[in-house]
Structures are given as C-alpha cells and as structure tokens.
Image: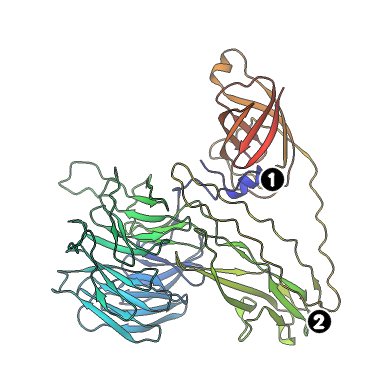
Amino acid sequence: MALSAAALAMAGLPAVAGAAVGDATSYPVGTGGVGYVTAGGDGQMWFSDSSGSSISRVPVGGGTPQKLSLGAINVMTLATRSDGTVVYGEGNGGIFGASATGTTELAKISGPSLIYQIATPTNGDLAWSDAYSGKAQRLTAGGQLGGQLELPGTGGQTPLLGAAADGAGNVWFSSFNDDRLYRMNGAGAISEPASGGASNTKLIASTGPTGMATGHDGNVWFNSGSGRIGSVSPAGVVVQPRPAGVAGGGGFAVAAGADGSMWFAVQGTHKTKTQTEPEAPGSLLRVSSTGEITPFPFKTDVHPFSLATGADGNLWVTDQDTSQLLEIETGAPAAVAATPFLSGTSRPGSSLTCGGERFSSWAGKQPTTLGVAWLRDGQPIAGSTARTYTATTADLGRAISCRVTSRYDVPRVFAPATSPAVTITANGTPIATPSPSPTPVATPTPTPVPTATPAATPTPAPVAVPTPTPVPVAAPTATPPAPVVLVPGVNVPKGAAPQSTPLAQVQIITCKYKKPKGKAAKKNKAIDATCKTTLVVTPAKSTREVKATIGRRGKTNAATVIVGSRALRIVSPRILPKGDFTLVVGKKRWTVNVG
C-alpha cells in the first residue's frame, strides 16, 4: 500500500501520490455506457457515450457531468488539438470541434468512411485513420486538406485503425489486416519504412496493430489485437515485445502516462454461449521508461477500451460495457503544484499582479505556459492577458481572479491554475502576499518496477510587484502548533471514516517502546510505542503505510511505518533490544530510542 501525499506529509516522509499504483476509482456517469475519453483544454475529462450520440465533460476527481447532445451523429473517436480544442470523428466521415456550447464541422470526407483515431501534432494539424475506406488524411491548422494515404480494397478489407504523431512531425497509421505501419510526413508524403529487416516491411505476422499514441521518447507506440505491443521510431525502427502471462489477448488503446511510462489496455475476454473456460477480466500494462512491463489486472469485470491522462496525473479509462469512468492511480503528481496568487490593492485604479504558480514535472519535463487570463466572477475579461490588471469601476463588488494555463505535449494535457479571487471595493484592501509554499519532495520510484522519477519543481523567481498606495501590510505570522503526544499502536479499523483533522507533518520523533513478552513476542512483531513529536495539523484522507528500514551499527531490517489520524506504528521483522536505532524512510532519517 502506498501513502497518499497528504499522509506522507503527515509523517514527514517522502511524498508518494495517492493510493497504490494501479488502484482504480469508479465514477458513474450515466446509463448509456462510455466510449472514448480525452483531456480537454479546460482541464476536464471529456468522454462520449457508447452509442456515440453525446459528449460530456467532468472535472478530474469526479463531479456532475455536463452533457452535450449531438443528435444523430455517431462519435467514433475523441482527441484534443494542440490549441485545447476537443475534436471528434464520426461515422459518416465528419471531423468536428466541440465546445461546451456546441460543435463546429472542420472537415468532411466524401464516400463511405469510419473515422477511427485522430492524431494531433504539436503544430495544430489533425490527421486521422479510416477503418472503412482504408484512407488516411491530414488537415492543416489553417483548414486545408493535405496528403492522403489510400490502401487497396474498401469496405473494411484493409482498415486503418491507429493514428499518432511522432516527435519529428510525422504521423503514423496502423493497418490491422496486413500488419503494416505507414508514415506520413508534414508535407503529406507517404512511406512504409522497413520494420524488422532489410526487406521486411511488415510487422510480426498476425500482430494486428490497433490504437497508437505519442511516446515520451519521441516514438509512436501501438497496441494490437494479438497482445503484442510495440513502438516505431521516426526513422522506422520497430520494437515489438510480447508481454508474458497476460490473459485475454490484446486491446485497442495506448496512452502516455504522467509517470513517464506507456500504458496499454488489455480487453480481456467475455464468455460466450459455447465457451467453457471462465472469462478473463481486463487489465492495464505499464511499460516503464527502462522497458519493464508490469500488468495491473482489474479486480472487477472491467474491459478497458479508451485511455487518457488527466490533469491530476492519473490515467482515465472507459469500459464500453459499463456506465462509468475509472481513474487509475499512476503515482505521478497533479499538474498544478501551486495556484497563482494576487498582489496589490483591491480598489478601482489600482493594479493587481498575478504570479507564484508552479507546475509539476512529468517525465522530467516542465509544461509550456500558454498565457494568463483575468476573470470577473469566473468569466474571462476580454483583452486582459498580461500579468497585471488595473481594476475599474465596472469591477466594484465583483470577484477578480487570474488563471494561468500550461500545456504538456506528452501526454497532451492542459493545466489551468486559478488564483483565489478578491472582491473590488471603493476603499480597497491591501492584499498580503502569501508565504511561498515549500518545494514538494521528489516522488520515489514505485515498487516493483522502477519508473522515471519526476524532478522536483523549482520555485520560480518571484514576480516583481509594483508598490501600491497604501503599502500592503505583511501577512500575519501563523501561530506555531503546540507539541502533541502521539500515541502509536492504535490501528484504525478497516472501513472506518477518516478523521477530519489528522496529523500532518512530523518533524522530530523520539520513542520509547514496549516489547511483547512470552508467546506474544513470537507472533506479534509490532512495536508499541509512545512518541513525542512536533507536528502540523492538516487534512488527510485515511490511514496509510510506507516502507522503511530500522537498525543500527550498519545492520538494518525492513520495516513499515503506519501513519494514522493520531497514530504511529512501526512494524519490524524482529523484536528490537534496548538502545538507539535509526529509522530510514526514503532520504529521511530519525533516531528512535527503544527503552
């Protein structure tokens, strides 16, 4: 079990995000089933129903979906353009852009067609695969149709299923029936590079390549119907590992994770009338940045279909057989590490300054900051996109805030960060600049497969703030919390409601332990203790545990630290004698005394 970031801060331990990697949280979103999912430019998750007649959006972390009905249109795929527009392809060859208020047709393909996946290069172009006609085409950011790939045969004989852009500006397409990959460059020229030998232009026989996604390494990764996953470089070098011990064959979707890994959907199998063996539930495969493959089977009957990374750093999954979205813990931090704040005086004629936002590094990279928007009662103020804003009489009695939006390209995720609002009054109030938040510690590599460790986000240089009149007063100094006696050994019952004010950040631990005696000493390896500590009280979700070592004189033993709302318990593999020991969790060390 992994510690949540809040629970780890509670123990003064290195931050590990959320629950254990692979844990799933279900969000019911209707009764019609769920089709495709993508992360929209507004930071919310957009998804289609399995019938394709509507698109909805829901905030990350759950909420009430906002539905956009489309009538008779059949949505076949969803994607997010580099400008944040959600785009979709439909069953009759139309390419549309979607917003909260409606849709706009971007292109229309003549003849029978079935748009199956849309690629979104960083230059604003779109390119798509056609599962019916065997065609692929590219639409420039300016709205011009570019090059076209057309395979021999129609009516689904040579379907193109996957489409994704690589790091060099090419778009790749996967041909399911003949096990081939095709490359279209930025000018629309088509080529089929060697993919397994000097004269072999095909993938491994019976691969059946399906969905594709841009990888952190600049390659395009593909899933398959056979369970053999793979990647292709911009130069055409193909790698096709086959995961071992994965039930249920292959799947369609693949997505880049915020943790630096690639994630693949494995559909599993449904039981038919003539089938005697049991059903195989679906699973996810994680391929780390160093190539290790780890399966994460679902604990319930889930058959994953579409995947997308959200602004919370987690993976969002749809299952066409159910009416729910699933959020999968990846261990990566949320995109927004700190929201911006306002400085200045809240009265007409005075300037307000927006600054102080921070964004997490994903796979060792920071996002691109796209711009600033000033909001009045939550709505953008036209033309106000600078770091400073001068309040006007039209703002009297209104709530003013600023929003800074950043974009990650791999995975394609937009991260809007909004400041707390201030109300403009006639006399105004100086706005105290908050103390800077501590830089979050780096996330340790999850066990058992090492993944890329997100770099710690540096605190940006403070934005210069013009001195208003009157001069803002300094923020009041928070009263330090009083020392508290922490009584470990108290387990929180399974299923118990979490405490509303659990302990937050342990700075010093000094413990005296009671060792079990007699038969209990052989069975009970937990060491009960009374520990005096200095701490800060902030909310945390539940009791968590984290791996540690405890020992002395160079000899260490694996241990577990269980942190509860008001409990600390150290579980060691053996009963410790009296004396001082060193407790090590990540890069943190404490001296604990066994008395």
What's the coloring here? rainbow
Q: Look at label 2 and name its amino acid.
A: Ala
Above or below residue 593? Residue 401 is below
Q: Residue at x 18, y 56 (%)?
A: 206
Which mark is nearer the camera, 2 or 1?
A: 1
Q: Residue at x 60, y 36 (%)?
A: 562
Q: Look at label 1 and name its amino acid.
A: Gln
Question: Quarter holding the C terminus?
Answer: top right
Could you tell whether 559 is left or right of 79 in the image? right
Q: Is residue 552 visible?
A: yes
In the picture of the structure, the residue carrying the numbered disc 1 is 505
In the picture of the structure, the residue carrying the numbered disc 2 is 426
Residue 69: horizontal and vertical position, in percent?
Answer: 39, 75
Q: Residue at x 60, y 68 (%)?
A: 417
Q: Earlier in the sequence, mark 2 or mark 1?
A: 2
Residue 471: horizontal and vertical position, in percent?
Answer: 85, 74
Quarter of the view holding residue 55: bottom left
In this rendered view, identify the residue nearer to me: 159 or 183. 183
| SS assignment at label 1 | loop
Distance between the Cα atoms at labels 2 and 1?
A: 41 Å
Give residue 178's mark: none
Q: Is residue 297 visible?
A: no
Residue 473: horizontal and vertical position, in percent?
Answer: 85, 68
In this rendered view, identify the residue nearer to me: 285 or 425. 285
